[in-house]
């Protein structure tokens, strides 16, 4: 997989000195935190974008039938899902959709269930909409994360807890929820009338033969369902991607649509349209190559840790391009862990507790970069905890 060295010279969020200074106390760290990649985008996408810019007409854009058929084909080929375009709304970001759904389907101070440690913006969106964060923490057995279904049943029973936000694949722990797990979730939501938001942004990056199932496969069983997704992660397009809200139920969809219309959200951006259509039509090879590269990078970390006797444990990801590293056998204090690792290794990773206190004494490392950088960084981290 080609690494674009020039990417490192662009004012990207990941390398922005202000962000680095405020997060890591130095702008000299090797940035392996925010979830974007250091790979050049797929050549066909780049070419399509260049052609579109050369066309030079940027009047109002619309999504032609070719866009929808490319999107339908992607869902059919990858997930065996017959995507119904009537059920899809477009929004500027997944978090825009989540806050809209929360506002439309719960009241101030109602509970929204999340499964920490989890993508921190879920917590932020719940706070910003003045709802209560209800935690159904994942269970960790030392190697593997599971859903605590008994606790979920209790939380879902509470009448005021109206919505569950599921992250599948799960960021940051890397689980890809199985059909059995998803069926249990659907059944709990149905029994307790809980609306299920499933954030499936990492759906395409599935590793080591695991299999992703969208909750859309269960829309006949439970229709209070909002599936959020985009190709931002898959094809490294977060700065030009929009997102989809797939909502099978007509009443829920109309309510969300009304809110999007109120703020005129979902207008088609010419570059986004071109990039996504090309990704759906011609992105398969690039994606296969990406997955292979990420798997190789996971294996490098695994081998380096095995050689090192360092007591750092790798929670092997089933999906996403992040690895979740366990430092619980080495540190007792999150601040000390973060400082020691960051200062001594010079590698800037996300501290686990940024994803909720359930992530304390873990770190999330972004491995969508070169093998050399992954190897070099994990060696520095090992050295930092040995000293
Ligand atoms: C689970 C998850 N959802 C959503 C996002 C961000 O999506 P958006 O930029 O469309 O809000 C991320 C980004 O890291 C993510 O990991």
Image (cartoon, rainbow, N blue to C red):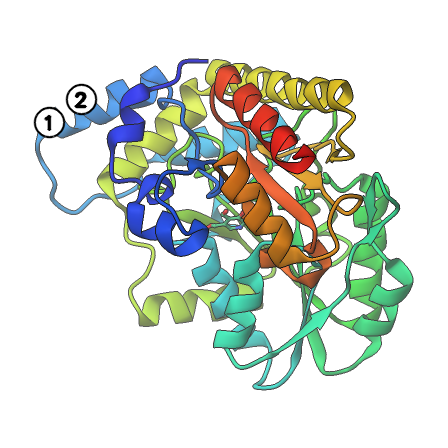
Is the residue marked 1 within 8 Å of ligand 1, measured from its CB?
no
Image quadrant occupied by the C terminus: top right
Instruction: Estimate the x, y position of residue 208 in percent, counting from the top left.
Output: 72, 21
Marks 2/1 in contact by CB < 8 Å: the verdict is yes
Spot the residue most to the right: 150
Return the residue at label 1.
55
Q: Is 258 rendered above or below residue 337?
A: below
- Say whether residue 37 is left or right of residue 340: left
- Above or below, 119 against 374 in this view is below
Residue 138, how many percent across, how many down? 79, 55
Question: The residue tagged with tag 2: helix, strand or loop?
Answer: helix
Give the residue pinned by disc 2: 51
Residue 324 occupies quadrant: top right
Question: Among all residues in the image, which is located at the extreme left?
Answer: 56
Is ligand 1 within 8 Å of the beta carbon of the residue shown at mark 2? no
Is residue 362 or residue 95 the one in the foreground? 362
Q: Residue at x 60, y 20 (%)?
A: 297
The image quadrant of residue 213 is top right
């Amino acid at each position: 997989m080609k690494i674009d060295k020039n990417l490192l010279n662009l004012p990207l969020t990941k390398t922005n000195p202000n962000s680095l200074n405020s997060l890591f106390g130095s702008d000299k760290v090797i940035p392996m935190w925010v979830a974007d990649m250091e790979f050049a985008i797929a050549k066909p996408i780049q070419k399509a974008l260049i052609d579109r810019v050369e066309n030079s007409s940027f009047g109002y854009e619309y999504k032609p039938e070719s866009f929808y058929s490319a999107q339908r084909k992607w869902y059919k080929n990858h997930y065996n899902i017959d995507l119904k375009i009537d059920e899809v709304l477009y929004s500027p970001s997944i978090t825009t959709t989540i806050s809209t759904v929360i506002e439309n389907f719960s009241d101030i101070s109602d509970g929204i269930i999340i499964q920490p440690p989890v993508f921190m913006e879920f917590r932020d969106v719940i706070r910003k909409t003045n709802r209560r964060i209800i935690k159904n923490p994942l269970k960790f057995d030392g190697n593997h994360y599971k859903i605590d279904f008994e606790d979920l049943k209790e939380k879902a029973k509470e009448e005021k807890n109206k919505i569950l936000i599921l992250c599948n694949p799960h960021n940051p722990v890397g689980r890809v929820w199985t059909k059995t797990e998803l069926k249990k979730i659907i059944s709990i939501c149905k029994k307790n009338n809980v609306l299920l938001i499933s954030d499936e942004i990492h759906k395409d990056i599935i590793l080591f033969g695991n299999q992703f199932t969208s909750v859309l496969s269960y829309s006949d069983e439970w229709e209070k369902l909002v599936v959020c997704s985009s190709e931002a992660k898959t094809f490294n397009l977060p700065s030009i991607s929009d997102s989809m809200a797939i909502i099978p139920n007509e009443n829920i969809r109309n309510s969300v649509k009304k809110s999007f219309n109120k703020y005129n959200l979902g207008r088609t951006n010419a570059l986004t349209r071109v990039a996504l259509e090309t990704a759906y039509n011609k992105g398969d090879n690039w994606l296969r190559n990406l997955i292979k590269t990420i798997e190789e990078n996971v294996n490098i970390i695994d081998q380096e840790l095995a050689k090192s006797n360092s007591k750092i444990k790798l929670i092997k990801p089933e999906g996403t391009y992040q690895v979740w590293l366990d430092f619980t056998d080495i540190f007792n204090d999150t601040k000390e862990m973060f400082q020691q690792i960051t200062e001594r290794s010079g590698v800037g990773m996300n501290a686990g507790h940024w994803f909720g206190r359930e992530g304390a004494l873990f770190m999330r490392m972004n491995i969508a970069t070169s093998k050399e950088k992954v190897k070099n960084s994990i060696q520095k981290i090992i050295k930092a905890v040995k000293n």
